[in-house]
Each structure stands twice: as C-alpha cells, then as structure tokens.
Amino acid sequence: MLPRVDKRVSQYGVHHQTGLLACQIIANNASNGYLENEKRQPVTTLQDDILVDEVYYFVVPGQDDYPIVPSFQDWEFLHSRSYEWPEISSDKRPEVRCTVTQNAHATYLA
C-alpha cells in the first residue's frame, strides 16, 4: 500500500507513474504490467497525473499469479530495461514541497 501524499486540487493520492513503477518492481520487474481501477478497467489517466481512487489493482497480462519480490534487498535492477525517469526542470523554482520530506526540489541548484 502506497501512502497518498501527492495532492491534486483538494484530494490526496499517488503519482500514477510512481505507483505503477513500484508495482512493477514488486512484481519482479513486470514491465508489461498496468493498473486497473476498482471496476477492473485499465487506468487511463496520464502517467504524470495523481491517482485519487481508494483501490487500484496491478495486472500482469497472461498471469493470474506472478512472483513477488519480498524486499528491496532481494530485487535485482533490470539493466536491460530503460527506465524513463521524469525530467526535472531547473528553470523555475517549485511552488510546493514534498509532503513527506518537505524538500522543495529533488536536486538543489548550485
């Protein structure tokens, strides 16, 4: 369960791409997996949007059961996969802070 620390207007939720990547890692690098909503329909929000529903399911196509990585120490980084990390803009200061760490930006400008 991921904490709902990202805010969209007046609702808290989970950043879509972050939640999806966390599920893919937990499912032993199931990069073809995707999220479904409570009605078991694929989530269609943009990956940079915030998921605000109470329940989401992670689905790996063709596998009702899939391996789960028991801890981060047991996870192996998949070097053959090209992860798409979001770009951090350095041309403007962020307007909000991280709810958990209170950092205003992932990296500080020199």
Image (cartoon, rainbow, N blue to C red):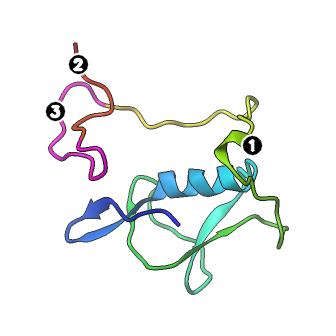
Prevailing SS of the magenta stretch: loop
- Tell me if mark 3 has few (under 14), some (14-19) or many (20+) residues whose alpha carbon lies within 10 angstroms of its own: few
- The mark that comes first in sequence, 1 or 2, is 1
Q: Position of residue 5 (x, y in %)?
A: 33, 60
The residue under the point 84% across, 68% down is: 63
Per the image, the residue denoted by label 2 is 109
Segment tinted magenta in the rendering: 89-102
Return the residue nearer the eye: 98 or 71. 71
Q: Answer with the quarter of the image where residue 67 lies.
A: bottom right
Residue 7 among those drawn in magenta = no
Q: Position of residue 35 (x, y in %)?
A: 60, 67
Amino acid on which the number 2 mark rests in the picture: Leu
Q: How many marks?
A: 3
Q: What numbered label is drawn on residue 93?
A: 3
- The mark that comes first in sequence, 3 or 1, is 1
Q: Position of residue 106 (x, y in %)?
A: 33, 33
Secondary structure at numbered mark 3: loop
Q: Is residue 63 above or below residue 6?
A: below
Per the image, the residue denoted by label 1 is 74
Q: Is residue 42 above or below residue 33?
A: below
Between the residue at mark 1 and the residue at mark 2, the CA separation in whole angstroms equals 34 Å
